[in-house]
Amino acid sequence: MKEKRNPWAWIPTLYFAEGLPYVAVMTISVIMYKRLGVSNTDIALYTSWLYLPWVIKPLWSPFVDLIKTKRWWVYSMQLLIGAGMAGIAFTIPTTFFFQASLAFFWLMAFSSATHDIAADGFYMLGLSTDEQAFFIGIRNTFYRIAMLTGQGLLVMFAGFLETSTGRIPYAWSITFFVLAGIFIAASAWHRFILPYPAEDKQRSGVTANSILMEFGRTFVDFFRKPGIVPALLFMLTYRLGESQLVKMASPFLLDGKEVGGLGLSTARVGFTYGTVGVVSLMIGGILGGFAIAKGGLKKWIWPMALCLFIPHLVYLYLSFAMPDNLWIINTCVGFEQFGYGFGFTAYTMFLMLFSDGEYKTSHYAICTGFMALGMMLPGMVSGYIQELIGYQSFFIWVLISGLPIFFVLPFLNIKSKTN
């Protein structure tokens, strides 16, 4: 029997390792491709496709239970993520960097989605119920720290290398080598430090066919839930504006003023969007959690939807005013990200409540799949729309895209226990 490990030794690093590849795939890739001269249309289209592994991860989650242990999946996927990041670093200086690096980003995305399944499952197996409740805030905090590291510190590091060397591909190649090193070290650390829960063992006497049949039943039960149609519309439209804004926010900050952008350097974008923005996002999320805990989701659903929608106006203001003052830019981005953090709390709470029941875990995985789909499809066309109509008209379009959710909210069935 292996000795019990102190949760403080592995939970912070496990959830840091869960958040960093996601932010690398979703955000760092956008900034990197922009600095390497890729068009907004191609950036939005191809990086939005990278959401697909998170959309379809419920389809292969049963096999993470069936094959090997969750402990094995955790450190194996971290090693594979590190290999994917090293592959990106090697291909950036090449003439075919876009196609080659996208292939490695796909490897990272699938590995990261699989890692999410295993890490969240291991969290429940490696801790008692009381420990799970205690460490929920710790895991979320370190997931956010990973976002801060990725969108902030690493982008600022790449910007520093761009300035000091004058070689943009070299700067981003070194940045991804650093990321690869972090994940190779994380894999070695977790192989050593993760506990060996008795329940985390390869299941015997279970066939792939029986797993698939049970999983099929969870899907049928999900689509028979009361209020399924407005719930699905909610999942797909709540972030309709945000899904497009998030793809074009960094290009807007980076693009020169001659094409309607603000002309910030890579390092300044790392500080503005990745540091000020992420800290504001964290504060908004914390306050949103307190608000729902005190007043319930039914009371806060409309105010939170408005808090997600109204701050998008700051990008419309920035596109017309085009300020040079960094305090103004940082305040605007911080305000938008605070609203997103506060408003997004209602979204995650609704998904958890809607998933409640016999198949809660599987149903939540399906909900997060629809959430990722709602980000992927609009994000794919956002770059094309922006290049077609320009930044000012695009941000007006983002506001229009945020309106459909207000026609869905009256039809939501929010459980009474959240009153």
Image (cartoon, rainbow, N blue to C red):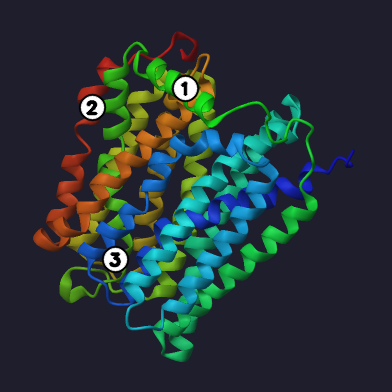
Q: Position of residue 213 (x, y in %)?
A: 47, 22
Residue annotated with mark 1: 213
**Residue at figure coordinates x 60%, y 41% from the top left:** 118
Q: Earlier in the sequence, mark 1 or mark 2?
A: 1
- For marks 3 and 2, the one nearer the N-term is 3
Within 10 Å of the Cα at label 3, are there few (<14), some (14-19), or many (20+) other Cα atoms? many
Q: Amino acid at mark 3?
A: Pro
Residue 85 in view in this figure: yes
- Where is mark 2, residue-wise? 406
Which element type, helix, strand or loop, lies under badge 2?
Answer: helix
- Of marks 3 and 1, the one in the foreground: 1
Q: How many marks?
A: 3
How crowded pointer 2 is (Cα within 10 Å; few <14, some 14-19, many 20+) is rated as some
- Residue 357 image position (x, y, % from top left): 51, 14
Q: Is residue 352 above or below residue 6?
A: above
Instruction: Answer left or right for 181 relative to 93.
Output: right
**Mark 1 and mark 2: span between their CA atoms?**
38 Å
Residue 195 image label: none
* Residue at horizontal 26 percent and vertical 15 percent from the top: 411
Residue 70: image quadrant is top right
Q: Secondary structure at mark 3?
A: helix
Q: CA distance from mark 3 to mark 1?
A: 45 Å
Q: Which residue is mark 3?
A: 251
- Above-or-below relation of 358 to 401: above
